[in-house]
Amino acid sequence: MRDIVFTRQSGWIPNVIREDGELKLMLGAGADANHEPRTFTFSIGEAHLAVIREDLARHLLLWSAVLPLCDAAGTRGRLDENAAITLLDPVLLSTPADVDALFRRIRWDRSRLIAHGADIELLGRGQVCAAMRAATETPNEKRARKYHVNRRRTDRGAVLGPLDTALLKYTGQYLHGATVPRRMPDAVDPTLLPEVLRVIATAEQARAGMWIGRDPRRGKRATDKQDWERMAATVDAAVRRGHPELVDEAVRTVGFLMCSEAADRSRSSPVEDDAETAGDRAHSGGGARQRGLSFTDDKGVEKKWLPGSPRSAGAEFWEFVGDRSAADNEVFTIEDEEMGEGIQLHFYADSIARVTTLREGAGSGSDPEYRVEYSLVDGIGGYRNLVSTFVRGGCAALDHHGPWMSDAAEFERARRRRRGAQ
């Protein structure tokens, strides 16, 4: 039989319960192997209950001291109840000086106290009781996260200036560096906003004319890693050159914002726009393709493209790749059956093969004769260029996009050399 004897407004601050006639402190901490919250209990006395009822600061200090024991229990271990019980008198019944001395000897959870209003400067000086004079029942988790993030920056030796901080707040990455950045001018001190916008303008000017395309090899919404890295490097260099006082973290958050926005624009653009390479645009006046194409993947799935289709052959092919590409499906083929030629894209190897029919099979006992040539490919941009070129002009148009190797062993050596150089 379990009854609640005392609880506070915040559900996470430990409760006092009576279980089978015995007073116990009950707290939730950590998680089990299934990510469900774990609950721990240990015995307390009436004198401890009296202090817990009347003194929020001592209650919170006890919680802070016990939490490391819960962490030590892990996902399935038992709480060291004896160790927890030995903390009761020193934390709840001792003088403030003795409590301060205790906290200089034991592990304790600083973030819990900061979330509940502890004075950070006094905590840093070891005056934990004085630090808790303004303690609150309701936690401010954002305050604790801010402290944690700044502590990690200090450990790395990073010191933020006012403009650095303003830029991180503008992008929403002051507390969460892994979140997708966005523009939040209201989060910035109005006196610093003009300086922030000048930095952003420098970055926008640097990325003007650049584009982050999609990479259907990794799914329908994936974007080109090389394009991203190229834009990030360009923006980084421009911002460092124009604003040398900024720390690395502030420069990176501006580059992250620029690249994220460009990637979002790419994802929201029609597939036809994304499929058009610079070569496609340059040859857009060259007339429509008159023959159909067949697309296949490594699982034997086929899709046809016919002349007169409302979308370009390149757009249809890359949508097919985006729909079908997977870790076990990384070989895609485009075939012009009428001309007896095609290309095979090997995404797992960053390579391509072009296949030309030299002689058709005559009768049931004769196999066709093919010429197969291989070439290395540089990223999704290289693949797009080769697909576009083949769609426009077939295998012959690929002559200038080599070198092409007909010897498979020679090609494997070239692949190994490139892999070793990376």
Image (tube, rainbow, N blue to C red):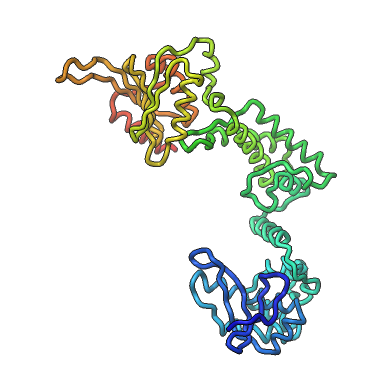
Residue at (20, 21) in percent of width and height:
367
Quarter residue 87 falls in: bottom right
14 or 406: which is nearer to us?
Answer: 14
Location of residue 313 in the rendering, given as x and y in whole percent from the top left corner: 46, 21
Identify the residue shown where x is 58% and y is 80%.
41
Give the quadrant of residue 71: bottom right
Q: Name the spot of residue 165 as percent of width and height, x first.
A: 74, 49
Judging depth in this view, the residue of 362 and 89 nearest the camera is 362
Q: Image quadrant of residue 19?
A: bottom right
Q: Is residue 109 left or right of residue 130?
A: left
Q: Residue at x 21, y 17 (%)?
A: 361
Q: Is residue 213 visible?
A: yes
Q: Hey, which residue is sitting farthest right in the picture?
A: 191
Residue 357 location, x and y as percent? 28, 17
> Closer to the camera, 120 or 135?
135
Instruction: Name the quarter where the N terminus is drawn.
Output: bottom right
Q: What number of labels is visible? A: 0
Left or right position of 239 against 293 = right
Q: Relative to residue 43, is residue 200 depicted above or below?
A: above
Q: Residue 26: image x %, image y %?
A: 62, 78
